Image (spheres, rainbow, N blue to C red):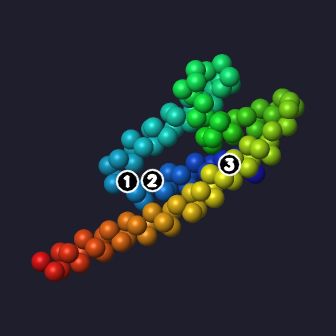
Amino acid sequence: MLNWVGMLACGLALEAMITLLPARFIAFFLILWIVSNVSVAVFPLQVLPHLYRYGYAFPFYNISRAVRSIVFRRKNDVGMNLGMLLAWVALSCITIPLLQWFMRRRIVAAQAKTVQI
């Protein structure tokens, strides 16, 4: 369940950006998305510079922290991590229709402008 929600959070965030960005920029966003997620998931954030504090809200950090809690039977933060991942899913499910509506409105306006000319 945890891995499924984590991949859903990452995939839906990418899906939202696919709606917004042209096809030629998707690869750049995907590389940036993966690097920014993995850079905070390898080491604990307490030992990293303050620049990496954004990682508390990123999906890969929450997935890795929840998996560490389960595997090593340490402090149980799985509920908080799962909640953060579900927040990413909810945010993406809200932004995808809004971005699709916005982009569709731009396309319709451009087509109407072309027809008038």
The vertical placement of 112 against 96, above or below, is below
Identified by mark 2, the residue type is: Met
State the residue position of label 3.
85
Q: Residue 72 placed where, x, y %?
A: 84, 29
- Compared across the picture, whether 100 is left or right of 72 comes to left
**Amino acid on which the number 3 mark rests in the picture:** Leu
Amino acid tagged 1? Leu
The spot of residue 95 in percent (x, y) is 52, 60
In the rendered structure, which disc, 2 or 3, sits on the residue that comes first in sequence?
A: 2
Is the residue under label 2 in contact with that under label 1 (CB below 8 Å)? yes
**24 or 81, which is in the foreground?**
81
Where residue 31 appears, as percent x and y from the top left, is 45, 38
Point out the image quarter for the C terminus.
bottom left
How far is disc 1 from disc 2 in space, using C-alphas?
A: 6 Å
Residue depicted at 66% across the width and 19% down the height: 47
Q: Residues within 10 Å of mark 2 (few under 14, many from 20)?
A: some
Q: Picture coordinates of residue 80 (x, y %)? A: 77, 44
Say whether marks 3 and 1 touch (CB < 8 Å): no
Q: Please indicate whether residue 83 sits to the left or right of residue 24 in the image.
A: right
Task: Say which residue label 1 marks.
Answer: 21
SS category of the residue bearing label 1: loop
Residue at 39 percent across and 41 percent down: it is 28
Residue of label 2 = 17
CA distance for labels 3 and 1: 23 Å
